[in-house]
Image (cartoon, rainbow, N blue to C red):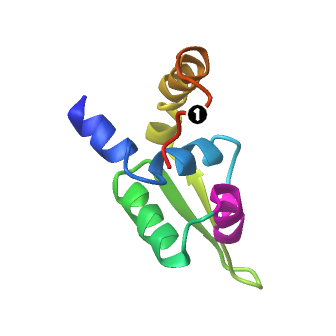
Amino acid sequence: MRRAFGFLGKRWNGILIATLMNGPAGFAELRCAVGGISDSVLSSRLSELTEANLVERLVDPGPPVSVSYELTESGRALMPALTALTSWAWENLPPSASAD
């Protein structure tokens, strides 16, 4: 459990995975969806998620060249657990509880 929460609980990782549950997204889309994340940190987190085989980086040679990110099968396998955690949080945590 420590390993899972150590990785998924790292700032921004969980919200990036949750955002990609809606389908592939580009860098700018992810930056807007997350809010408050710098480009360098977003790039670093996406690299970590890619190295962990939770996210895949897709390059469309274009023109113009475009890059998007989507969940891998392993990333999609997290969906039931994250959905359950979200439901638990809504039911059990006070509205003032946040990760910030």
Please tell me how crowded label 1 is: few (under 14), some (14-19), or many (20+) other residues with Cα within 10 Å: few
Compared across the picture, whether 26 is left or right of 43 comes to right
Farthest top residue?
91
Which residue is nearer to you in this view: 93 or 67?
93
- Residue depicted at x 22% and y 34%: 2
Chain part drawn in magenta: 25-35
- Residue depicted at x 56% and y 66%: 37
Farthest right residue?
63
Compared across the picture, whether 16 is left or right of 68 comes to left
Which residue is nearer to you in this view: 57 or 20?
20
Quadrant of residue 4 within the rendered picture = top left
* Circle 1 residue: 96
Relative vertical location of residue 88 with respect to residue 38 in this rendering, above or below: above
Quadrant of residue 1 within the rendered picture = top left
Number of numbered callouts drawn: 1
Q: Looking at the picture, which amino acid does disc 1 mark?
A: Ser
x and y percent of residue 71 in the render?
A: 55, 47
| Main SS of residues in magenta | helix
Relative vertical location of residue 33 with respect to residue 9 in this rendering, above or below: below
Relative vertical location of residue 24 with respect to residue 6 in this rendering, above or below: below
- Residue depicted at x 47% and y 32%: 78
x and y percent of residue 31 in the render?
A: 64, 66
x and y percent of residue 57 in the render?
A: 53, 64
x and y percent of residue 74 in the render?
A: 44, 38
Name the element at disc 1.
loop
Which residue is nearer to you in this view: 86 or 51?
86
Q: Is residue 92 magenta?
A: no
